[in-house]
């Protein structure tokens, strides 16, 4: 079973994907970490002409060992860098096989990101698109940073979130949109527990429907 979970930053998609993976006993991949790792690797080249070429090199060399420093990779800075490397077509191509191989492993997997249901796993058994309004997402991310002892400028953080949404949606090489067959789940007013219950119900219903279709086909 392949479950694709997409949505913007701080919508809750990562937490829900982890919860779904635990519930169904599946491996989980936060694909955003791949782009964050590439961005962090080429930060020194951010304003230089060779930024794109270095990003492609970093993407081609990426492996699981580059995904362990979560404090760095989950920072706001890493998120900004990720959205800048994600618009590079050859970076996306380099990371495609990594994601696709993870998804198609024996037994399936849960992947979350921005283009899982549209680009990486258009054939996923279940697709969810998680959304929440920008103010709620800003507050969630702010509390996350503050729990680590970081000082947060909420005004700047709100605009970073809005700018990243716009950059990702306008990315000509991306696929950040709700596919027609994805189930929409708005988490703005939901607790983590309630959102996970809703996600599990969506997956169970979708899989039961598929099983019924196979039975009568």
Image (cartoon, rainbow, N blue to C red):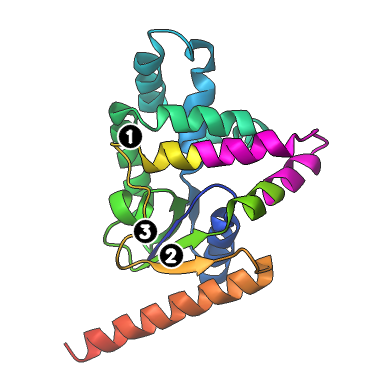
Q: Which residues are magenta?
A: 140-163
Report whether residue 65 is seen.
no
**Residue closest to the far top:** 49
Residue assigned mark 2: 128
Q: In terms of depth relative to the viewer, which is nearer, 33 or 11?
A: 11
Q: Quadrant of the N terminus?
A: bottom left
Compared to residue 194, the image places residue 107 above or below, namely above
Q: Position of residue 159 (x, y in %)?
A: 60, 37
x, y percent for residue 209: 33, 84
Numbered mark located on residue 54 in the image: none
Q: Earlier in the sequence, mark 2 or mark 1?
A: 1
Relative vertical location of residue 90 with respect to residue 170 in this rendering, above or below: above
Label 1, secondary structure: give it.
Answer: helix
Mark toward the start of the polypeptide (3 vs 1):
1
**If you read the primary sequence from the N terminus, does the residue marked by circle 3 or circle 2 appear first?**
2
Q: Tell whether position 109 is magenta.
A: no
SS category of the residue bearing label 2:
strand
Query: Mark 3 — residue?
Result: 178
Horizontal side of residue 29 vs 94, given as left or right: right
| Spot occupied by residue 195 in the image (x, y as percentages of width and height) | 60, 70
Q: Nearer the viewer, mark 3 or mark 1?
A: 3
Q: What residue do we see at 80% from left, 44% from top?
A: 147
In this rendered view, identify the residue nearer to me: 49 or 41: 49
């Amino acid at each position: 079973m392949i479950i694709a979970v997409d949505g913007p930053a701080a919508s809750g998609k990562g937490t829900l994907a982890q919860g779904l993976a635990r519930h169904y006993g599946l491996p989980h991949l936060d694909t955003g970490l791949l782009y964050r790792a590439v961005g962090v690797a080429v930060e020194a080249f951010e304003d230089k002409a060779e930024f794109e070429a270095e990003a492609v090199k970093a993407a081609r060399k990426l492996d699981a060992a580059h995904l362990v420093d979560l404090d760095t990779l989950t920072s706001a800075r890493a998120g900004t860098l990720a959205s800048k490397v994600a618009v590079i077509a050859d970076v996306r191509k380099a990371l495609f096989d990594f994601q696709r191989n993870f998804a198609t492993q024996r037994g399936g997997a849960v992947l979350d990101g921005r283009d899982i249901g549209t680009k990486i796993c258009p054939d996923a058994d279940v697709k969810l698109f998680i959304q929440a309004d920008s103010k709620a997402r800003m507050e969630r991310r702010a509390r996350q940073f503050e729990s680590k002892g970081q000082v947060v400028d909420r005004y700047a953080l709100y605009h970073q979130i809005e700018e990243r949404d716009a950059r990702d949606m306008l990315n000509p090489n991306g696929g950040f949109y709700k596919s027609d067959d994805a189930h929409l789940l708005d988490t703005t007013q939901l607790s983590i527990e309630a959102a996970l219950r809703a996600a599990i119900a969506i997956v169970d219903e979708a899989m039961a429907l598929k099983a019924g279709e196979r039975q009568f086909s």
